[in-house]
Image: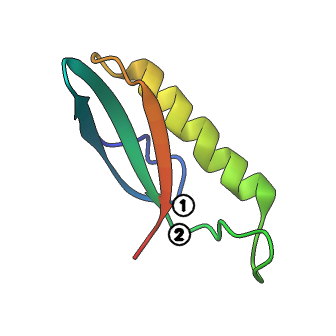
Amino acid sequence: MSLDSSNDHIVRSWHEWEIEGRERCVILVVETDVEMRPDEPGYDGAKLEEVRAAAVAASRRTASAVDRIRIIPAR
């Protein structure tokens, strides 16, 4: 799944599964170039909130149920 390209700070996204016994959890992983550590230079809470909002909107558009969203820094 690819997120809406309207957010320039989302580098890529994908689904992961966590399986424990019979339980399955679908996670939408979103990779971003936005600084995520509040103590670091360049941190912008508003930009991070935009990434979060785009990820939530994408999770609602997907045909499969997304149980969690994980936002990670770009490598």
Quarter of the view holding residue 24: top left
Image location of residue 31, percent across then percent down: 43, 59
Return the residue found at the far bottom.
Answer: 41
Q: Taking 41 as reference, is 31 above or below it?
A: above
Q: Is residue 74 above or below residue 66?
A: below
Pinpoint residue 44: horizontal percent, then vertical percent: 78, 65
Identity of the residue drawn at 51% across and 52% down: 71
Q: Residue at x 44, y 40 (%)?
A: 4
| Disc number for residue 33 | 2
Q: Quadrant of the N terminus?
A: top left
The quadrant the C terminus occupies is bottom left
Count of marks, rendered view:
2
Crowd tier of the residue under label 2, counting other residues whose Cα lies within 10 Å: few below 14, some 14–19, many 20 or above: some
Residue 9's disc is 1
Residue plotted at (68% across, 55% down)? 48
Name the side, left or right, on which 30 lies relative to 37: left
Which amino acid, mark 1? His
Residue 68: image location, x then y, percent: 46, 32
